[in-house]
Image (spheres, grey):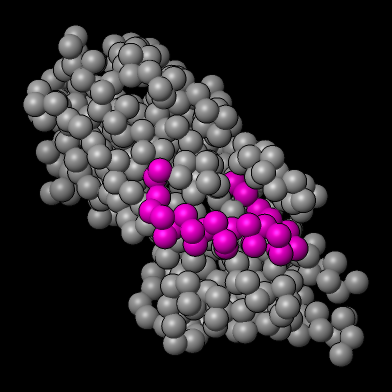
């Protein structure tokens, strides 16, 4: 069969939900938001004639079992195979997608895919390599094999920031002409509006939404691992509380494959630091963003930094570490600190907490900044790369 004929029969397969849940967890890659926008973009392109629905078919492939998927148009969801986790990714997925292009949005790609058809992979970061203490030996070993293989074999590679693109190219120079930076999207205006209309807090967050000055809090969001620097946040808030009462609410947990940070909280800090674990819904998290004095985000390393974008979308000022990825995301909408210096982190927290005009300026700058990030834009740029790979293979 010639290439032109093969293209007419080839679906673009998007294996989404297993890669997200097994390797990146449900929030980290934001694939659900991108997929919903991909569906809308596909509909728009189909109606405008950019996509011939007779020649291109879109499928999301997932293993069997319960999954949470957005409503999709022009994209079918197929649950296939009998295995799960890495076994499904490596042994069943490549054969299910062998008739078309395979897009893997969760850091790893089947080792057999180069022999079966074209492929595109999203590598969100190299944290397993650049911050190895945050991960178990088994996790580092698995990613140490699968991520370099994905980078080596994929027809095109997507990453989530120019900063991370630089990191990847510096360590894997052969990808230089195949790698593209595409930012994640911010929460859509529709979601933000729904949260704003719901003014009643849930039971799990009600007690920390007081407007009393003595009950104000800074918010920390992320996995409780060393690279996120939760200990630096705790130490900084202890310094802040020597002069000003300000609690720290920490939303996050550890997951399989992640090493715990081994946090130390002093006796006095027990009343200052509250661990909220994971919140049940994004609406609850959004209410925390809107109630907080600031988001405290002093990470040592990030590929993108989605919590900062979420915070800005919900009018929450951001105090972030001055690492390249967070400067790329936040621009002039954050105060930057040295993540290695709790005193500097504390100084910037005080600046936000004690200066209402500064807080308002950061809020307004943040709302303007998030307009540069959307899942529709992410979907369009991703689709363009998939289309280029299909066209190259068909020529």
Residue reaching furthest to the bottom? 1
The quadrant of the rendering that contains the C terminus is bottom right
Residue 224 rendering spot, x and y as whole percentages = 31, 43
Q: Which residues are magenta?
A: 133-161
Whether residue 278 is visible here, answered yes or no, is yes
Q: Nearer the viewer, residue 28 or 155?
A: 155
Residue 93 in the magenta stretch? The answer is no
* 48 lies above or below 122: below
Relative to 11, 144 lies left or right: left
Please report the residue visible at 87 percent of the width from the left and 81 percent of the height from the top: 3
Q: Is residue 54 visible?
A: no
Q: Nearer the viewer, residue 395 or 344?
A: 344
Where's residue 359, x and y in %?
37, 18
What main secondary structure does the magenta stretch of the protein show? helix
Q: Residue at x 17, y 30 (%)?
A: 265
What is the tally of numbered marks visible in this picture?
0
The image quadrant of residue 37 is bottom right
Q: Is residue 144 above or below residue 225?
A: below
Q: Position of residue 61 (x, y in %)?
A: 54, 77
Residue visible at 55% across and 75% down in the picture: 90
Task: Specify the quadrant that holds the N terminus.
Answer: bottom right
In terms of image quadrants, where is residue 156? bottom right
Residue 4 placement (x, y as % from top left): 88, 81
Asked whether, in this view, residue 5 is left or right of residue 338, the answer is: right
Q: Please report the residue visible at 68 percent of the width from the left and 82 percent of the height from the top.
A: 98
Q: Is 151 inside the magenta-drawn segment?
A: yes
- Eyeballing the image, is 229 above or below 80? above
């Amino acid at each position: 069969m010639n290439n032109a004929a093969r293209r007419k029969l080839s679906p673009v397969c998007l294996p989404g939900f297993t890669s997200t849940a097994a390797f990146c967890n449900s929030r980290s890659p934001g694939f659900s938001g991108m997929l919903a926008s991909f569906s809308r973009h596909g509909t728009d392109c189909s109606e405008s004639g950019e996509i011939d629905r007779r020649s291109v078919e879109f499928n999301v492939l997932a293993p069997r079992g319960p999954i949470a998927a957005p409503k999709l148009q022009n994209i079918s969801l197929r649950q296939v195979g009998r295995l799960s986790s890495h076994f499904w990714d490596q042994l069943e997925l490549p054969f299910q997608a062998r008739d078309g292009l395979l897009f893997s949005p969760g850091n790893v790609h089947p080792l057999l895919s180069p022999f079966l058809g074209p492929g595109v992979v999203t590598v969100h970061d190299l944290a397993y390599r650049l911050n190895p203490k945050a991960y178990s030996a088994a996790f580092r070993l698995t990613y140490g094999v699968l991520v370099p293989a994905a980078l080596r074999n994929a027809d095109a590679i997507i990453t989530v920031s120019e900063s991370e693109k630089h990191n990847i190219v510096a360590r894997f120079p052969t990808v230089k002409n195949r790698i593209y930076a595409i930012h994640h999207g911010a929460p859509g205006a529709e979601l933000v509006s729904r949260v704003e209309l719901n003014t009643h807090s849930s039971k799990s967050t009600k007690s920390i939404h007081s407007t009393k000055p003595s009950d104000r809090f800074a918010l920390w969001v992320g996995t409780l691992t060393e690279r996120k620097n939760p200990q630096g946040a705790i130490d900084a808030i202890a310094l802040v509380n020597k002069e000003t009462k300000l609690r720290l609410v920490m939303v996050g947990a550890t997951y399989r494959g992640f090493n715990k940070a081994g946090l130390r909280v002093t006796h006095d800090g027990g009343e200052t630091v509250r661990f909220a674990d994971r919140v049940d819904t994004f609406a609850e998290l959004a209410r925390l963003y809107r109630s907080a004095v600031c988001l405290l985000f002093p990470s040592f390393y990030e590929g993108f930094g989605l919590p900062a974008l979420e915070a800005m979308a919900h009018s929450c000022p951001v105090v972030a570490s001055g690492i390249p990825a967070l400067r790329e995301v936040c621009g002039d909408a954050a105060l930057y600190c040295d993540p290695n210096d709790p005193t500097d982190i504390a100084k910037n927290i005080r600046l936000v907490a004690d200066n209402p005009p500064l807080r308002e300026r950061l809020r307004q700058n943040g709302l303007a900044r998030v307009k540069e990030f959307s899942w529709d834009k992410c979907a369009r740029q991703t689709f363009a790369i998939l289309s280029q790979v299909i066209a190259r293979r068909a020529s």
